[in-house]
Amino acid sequence: MDRGSNGATYAGIAFGAGAGALWGLVFLAPEVVRGFSPLEQAIGRYLAYGVMSALLVAPRWRTLRALMTPRILWALAWLALAGNLFYYVLLASAVQMGGIAMTSLVVGFLPVAVTIIGSRQADAVRLRQLAPSLLLCIAGAFCIGWQAIAMPGAGPVATRLIGFGCAIGALVSWTAFAIGNNHWLRRMGDMPAQDWNFLIGLATGVQALLFLPVVFLLGVGQHDAAGWSKFAGVTIGIALLASIVGNALWNRMSRLLPLTMVGQMILFETGFALIYGFLWEQRMPTLLEGAAFVLVVSSVVTCIAAHRRPGPAEATVAA
């Protein structure tokens, strides 16, 4: 890997860390506004995201509209559902039923799925070279799974199991988004990454509007003015910091790093989510949570090392 390539890798890692720091706040939000349902939180966040995206993309809308083929519109629609609405409803449900630590560490299993799929690309680092990283990530997921199911917890075991299932669902949804978004970002190479983010925001805002009647059908809980003000502040803040700024950083990263490494960068989100969660709960991590955190961080480090190490062909040329 030459110096220019190293520079792109380091820049991509920095963007990934920034996105992770902002996305980690997403795991804290369901606890801050626990009185609101996951669907209410998702609709509030993505209505705000859609409005912000519309305002930011408006100056370039005529140019972008000319690029909107049916295939691209379909891609935006399913990416918005998988990476935003479905993902956030499942994630918020998992946080409220199983806790921040369990949810963030289950979602942290994403690199295993993305790396295995990404290793099939012709120019990808071989799966054998990524084996240490994958094994560390699997070990971390085992620790948190055992913590969620077998260890004593704040809620009933059945509730924690449902929360664990929601976290796995969020993992599946986020994996589909990460792979699909990476594919379309590379395919739409001439479009600025921030514009692609805003287009997904527009699609998500439209979908949130379509789901709004479902919220009223299910019934809106009883909240006072202070509760609604807090809800508005949290949803708008998360929309701005996570969906606008965090997604922009992630998209910049996705164009600088290979798919096998893109998946590993989600572990920054896991680390920051754990830190925020422990600060919110005013406690130290359990032994299993601490072990899982060390294992997933080690997974990131070994993945970066694998990408910096020259492959067999490069080593032969260098010799």
Image (cartoon, rainbow, N blue to C red):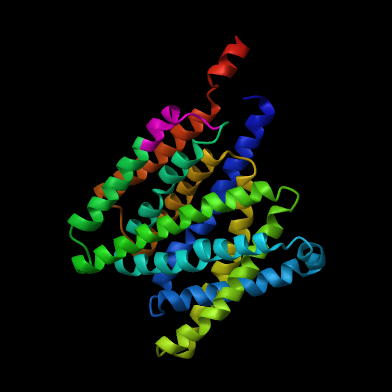
Question: How far from the left and from the top, in percent, is residue 258?
Answer: 57, 38
The outermost residue toward the front is: 70
The one of 259 and 294 positioned closer to us in this rendering: 259
Is the N terminus in the top left, top right, bottom left or bottom right quadrant? top right
Q: Position of residue 35 (x, y in %)?
A: 38, 80
* Figure quadrant of residue 149: bottom left
Picture residue at 47% right of the left edge, 56% below the top? 174
Q: Horizontal placement of 296 versus 317: left or right?
A: left
Asked if residue 100 can be seen in this view, the reply is: no
Q: Is residue 25 visible?
A: yes
User: In the image, 180: left or right of 98?
Assistant: right
In the image, residue 205 above or below residue 125? below
Q: Tell whether position 268 is magenta.
A: no
State the residue at coordinates (38%, 64%): 280
Q: Is residue 164 above or below residue 109?
A: below
Residue at 61% of width from left, 36% of height from top? 9
Of 37 and 260, which appears nearest the observer? 260
- Residue closer to the observer: 1 or 152: 1
Residue 248: give x, y in percent of width and height.
64, 56
Label the magenta part by its dominant secondary structure.
Answer: helix
Q: Nearer the viewer, residue 33 or 304?
A: 304
Write the start and end of the magenta stretch as one range.
Answer: 124-134
Please identify the quadrant where the C terminus is shown.
Answer: top right
Task: Name which quarter of the figure residue 232 lies in.
Answer: bottom right
Q: Residue at x 39, y 70 (%)?
A: 31
Rendered view: 291 above or below 21: above
Residue 159 image offset from top left, x and y in percent: 24, 69
